[in-house]
Amino acid sequence: MSNPTLDEETVLNALRTVYDPEIPVNIVDLGLVYNVEVDDGEVAIEMTLTTPGCPMGAYLAQQAEWRVAELEGVKDVTVDLTWDPPWSIDRITDAGKKLLGLA
């Protein structure tokens, strides 16, 4: 049975607890999460990294998967890394910019 509170916002809130160890901002506010889809306990996350060669890429994707998998009602989590469109500083949220001193 699926959890009626398992929705995109719940998943995004879980992803807000995942931080790039080199940047003190979570992956949502950094603009690394491009898309979240929730369908009957199946969660698909499309995300990117600040650079294709980011040494923390596998770590961040794994952390995202683990955090979301802990949510009630989640049956499966898929995290896909994409480079299209490429990440840019413009994707950082206003909250992220404040934390980084850019706003």
Image (tube, grey):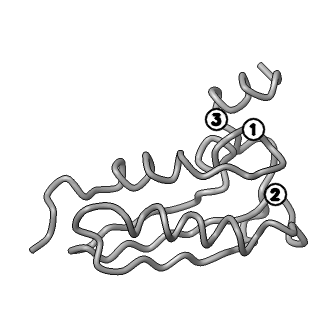
Give the residue displayed 55% in from the left and 64% down from the top.
Answer: 64
Which element type, helix, strand or loop, lies under badge 1?
loop
Measured Cα–Cα span from mark 1 to mark 2: 14 Å
User: Which mark is on residue 24?
Assistant: 1
Amino acid residing under circle 3: Thr
* On-image quarter of the N terminus: bottom left
Q: What is the residue that sits farthest to the right in this orientation? A: 53
Asked if residue 49 lies left or right of residue 63, the reply is right
Amino acid residing under circle 1: Pro
Front residue of 16/34: it is 16
Front residue of 64/52: it is 64
User: Which mark is on residue 103?
Assistant: none
Measured Cα–Cα span from mark 1 to mark 3: 13 Å
In primary-sequence order, the first of circles 1 and 2 is 1
How many C-alpha atoms fall within 10 Å of the one at disc 3: few (<14), some, or many (≥20)?
A: some
Give the image quarter of residue 53. bottom right
Give the residue displayed 86% in from the left and 63% down from the top.
Answer: 51
Location of mark 3 (residue): 93
Which element type, helix, strand or loop, lies under badge 3?
loop
Residue 11: x percent and y percent?
A: 39, 56
The answer to whether the residue labelled 3 contacts the one labelled 2, judged by CB atoms less than 8 Å apart, is no
Location of mark 2 (residue): 50
